[in-house]
Amino acid sequence: MNKFFYYNALCSGSNTQSVFSIDPYVTAIKELLVSELKQVVYYIEKLRSFDFDMSSYTDKVIEFITVLIVNLDFTKENTFIIIEDLYNNKKMLEKMYISACEKADLEPDLFSENTGNLSSKDIILKALNEKEKDIKTSGLNLKTDKNKKYLYEIMMNIVLNACNKLIELKSYGISLENAKNNVLSFLNTTNIPSLSDDELKNIIRNFAKNNYETTKILYNTLMKRFGPVSKTKVDVCEKEGQAVLVSGSGFDELEKILSAVKGLNINVYSYQEMISAFQYEKLRQHPNFAGHYTKSTNNIQSDFADFPGPVFVTKNSMPKIDVIRGRIFTSTKYPAFGISKIENDNFEPLVKSALETKGFLNNFTLKTINIGYNKNEIENGISEIITKFKNKEIKNVIIIGITDKFNIIDDYISEFLNLNHENNYIISFTEELKQNNFMHVNSYLDFGILYEIVEKLIEQESEIRNHISIFLADCNNTTISHIFNFIHLEVRNIFLGPCCPNVVSPVLVEGLDSMFNIKTLTTPKEDLELINEKGG
């Protein structure tokens, strides 16, 4: 197991040096899955050129790709099932392609780097062991040059998040066939080694445009389904009675859990980004939706262990860390080892677990926080910004956020906001200040309103796009996808906050800097000087 040290309070929950590790066996699983996926996609694209209807296979691939989002600590049985299933699909598609070529009297162009036979558990285990041995002795992807390594890593990250959005939209009855086909075409470009770095960068930018449209459809769907968004107060609390903790971003599953416990003495609490659910009127009206729960600073393992009831992690949202086993549930198709699976929206096991645990014995409120926003106030703020920009009263618009506000880098943000911003207008998704040229938007990890603000600024004054800077202070497994959405919107300066290596790899961060000029935060003074220099 390869270990490395990382100093970041956001990762460890305290200002201490943290140890992170890369498990070669888990990496071997991921690499074998990716290799098989790329071959499946290759043959789907070949068959599509023969006008085959590949929609059912496309859905399978989207689902397989989302497997890579979750913790890959599968049981060996699940590992064999996943890899064997992928292999069998690949062989079937390969035969279909060869048959199509024979009928058309064409020479089949077979995939050049086949991983070989993976038709049984023994063969799969042998292949994984060999790959693990290679990783231990040779490191990762040494056959790939550095820039390609960066670009492929970025591409895979964007694909994962695109597929997660498509799966989420599917849960609301929305199927975007063009978007699914774009995902496969995009992934298939990694099978073309002759593509130059510039060609790959353009392919990434083009895919980001399509992915941004999918993102907007998802946010509009959430607004129609659960909205409207409005200002409200949320207690960070504990209430006497049995309890269920819901983590992740799947509001549809939260709604189903709230329905399952209705009428029972079971309180449901949000965790991390799930606090955004309180913004939506339909969700916060549920009588069992008690409040938000957190005890640590970004220490998921500690919070899950301390919570006196079962924890439900929404589909494809499992954090990539070790977690306490036994009381954790998920609907993800292939849950990690020791995590119980909820199938067919049957939440009875979760409810039963809640009733069998002690829950909270007393009432306690740590604090009450404001959440949500008023659209009219935001519209007024945008109008003020446009007027001041046209009158040359401001040179730059600086957007700070979005964060979950429990894990923000307080010292940096406080120092940055206290600097002299005479020529800048600040839109803050973190702290609220009473000062000129300042607008506070009280949103927790809700990028929909941020995109809406940026779009409206650009629509009303196109030149302003060259004077917008965005600070992404919170770094999670959706951050890279958001970065490329902002690149699509032609935001000039994008700054990335500290990323935990087990969430966003150092390779990815390095590639974003060298290939796309995405800067990591340095000091508030230096970053502000860079903005003023470029925007001035």
Image (spheres, grey):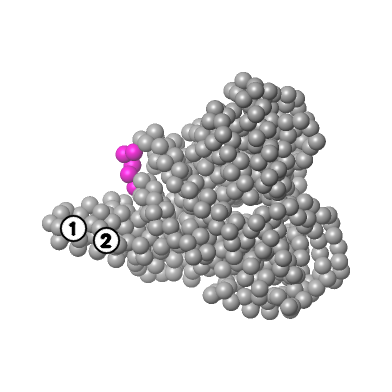
Residue type, label 2: Phe
Identify residue for label 1. Answer: 101
Q: Nearer the viewer, residue 129 or 231?
A: 231
Q: Which residues are magenta?
A: 191-195
* Depicted 490 relative to depicted 191: above or below: above
Which corner quadrant holds the C terminus? Answer: top right
Mark yes or no: residue 364 visible.
yes
Magenta span: predominant SS is loop
Secondary element under disc 1, as helix, strand or loop, is helix
> On residue 59, which mark appears?
none
Residue at 59 percent across and 35 percent down: it is: 457
Which amino acid, mark 1? Answer: Cys
Camera-nearest residue between 111 and 513: 513
Q: Is residue 287 above or below residue 509?
A: below
- Mark 1 and mark 2 residues within 8 Å of each other at the beta carbon: no
Looking at the image, which is closer to me, 19 or 81?
A: 81
| Res 268 seen here | no
Query: Which residue is drawn at the image coordinates 71% and 51% (left, top)?
Result: 372
Residue 263 at x, y = what percent? 73, 78
From the top left corner, tell me how far across and down residue 300 is, in percent. 69, 57
Give the number of callouts: 2
Residue 312 located left or right of residue 305: left
Q: Position of residue 190 (x, y in %)?
A: 37, 46
Disc 2 marks which residue? Answer: 52
- Measured in 3D between alpha carbons, the distance from the residue under mark 1 to the one under mark 2, in whole angstroms, is 12 Å
Which residue is painted at 74% across and 70% down in the image? 288
Secondary structure found at label 2: loop
Structural crowding at the residue carrying mark 1, measured as other residues with C-alpha within 10 Å and reported as few (<14), some (14–19) or many (≥20): some
The image quarter in which residue 220 lies: bottom right
Q: Is residue 194 magenta?
A: yes
